[in-house]
Each structure stands twice: as structure tokens, then as C-alpha cells.
Amino acid sequence: MQLDHVTIRTADIHATRAFFETVFDLTVGERPSAIRRIPGCWLYADGQPIVHIIGSRGAGFDLAAEAIDHVGFRLQGYAAFRTRLDGFAIPYSTMDLPDIGERRLFLRAPGGPLLEAVFSEAVPALPLENDHDLH
């Protein structure tokens, strides 16, 4: 199974769009004419529309809250991505899952949606405390 797309409902379409363009190198692309009445945009990676951003106000609705629990993006280059986030001063938390060989970073987009960056990388082994006492 693969992630097809995620839709993020936000009060600040511009900031959310800029965030995804900057952090994930996504590009704005075409949307079907049937949904163009809804404020928003589609963001593409490798020719596929994977993030849909829509307004939480307008086109006959007015929702107070942003909507999505979290969305996972499978990426490569854990260290480089952390450096990228640090360069943009974007706060994040980490989670290493050595039993399945994954490292994860959690960050928030403007408006609050939680994002998870998943990397299939071996988790570095931590040195054992007092390992010289194990003999």
C-alpha cells in the first residue's frame, strides 16, 4: 500500500502551502475543475498530487479547527532532513524504532497539523554505560 494523498484543511492556505513547498520541495500543480470552487491548492511530488490543501472557510462552510491527526511521509536522508529543519528553525521531536529499523521525526505545519517523517535507516547503537564492567 502507498499513500495516495492527504488533505489538510487550514485557515491559512498561503502559509501551509509555503511550508510544504519549502520543507518538502513540493510544487503546486493542477486541480480538477470540479473542485476549483473550493479555495486551496494541490502540491505535487514526482508528478503526483500527494498533498491537497483546502481552506477551512469559504465555499459554504466555516470550520473553526484545522483537520488531520497526522500524516506520515516516507523519506530518505534522516541526518540531511534534520539539518534542513534546523536551518528553517522548525521544531521537531524524534522517535527511533530499532526493532523495525526506522527513525522518525515529528513536526507541525502552520495551523497545527502533525506530520511524521519516516526514514528506513538503522538506528545507531548507543554505547553501553560501564561496558568495561561487563568482563
Image (spheres, rainbow, N blue to C red):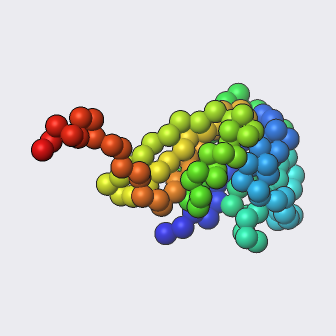
- Rendered view: 92 above or below 96: above
Residue situated in front as seen by the camera: 99 or 9: 99
- Rendered view: 104 above or below 89: below
Where's residue 119, x and y in %?
A: 52, 57
* Residue drawn at (61%, 64%) of the image: 4
The mark tally for this picture is: 0
Q: Is residue 109 visible?
A: no
Residue most extreme to the left: 135
* Residue drawn at (15%, 42%) of the image: 134
Where's residue 133, x and y in %?
A: 16, 37
Image quarter (top left, top right, bottom left or bottom right) of the C terminus: top left
Residue situated in front as seen by the camera: 36 or 110: 110
* Residue drawn at (35%, 44%) of the image: 126
Q: Is residue 79 visible?
A: yes
Q: Is residue 49 left or right of residue 122?
A: right
Q: Is residue 6 left or right of residue 74?
A: right
- Residue 63: image quadrant is top right
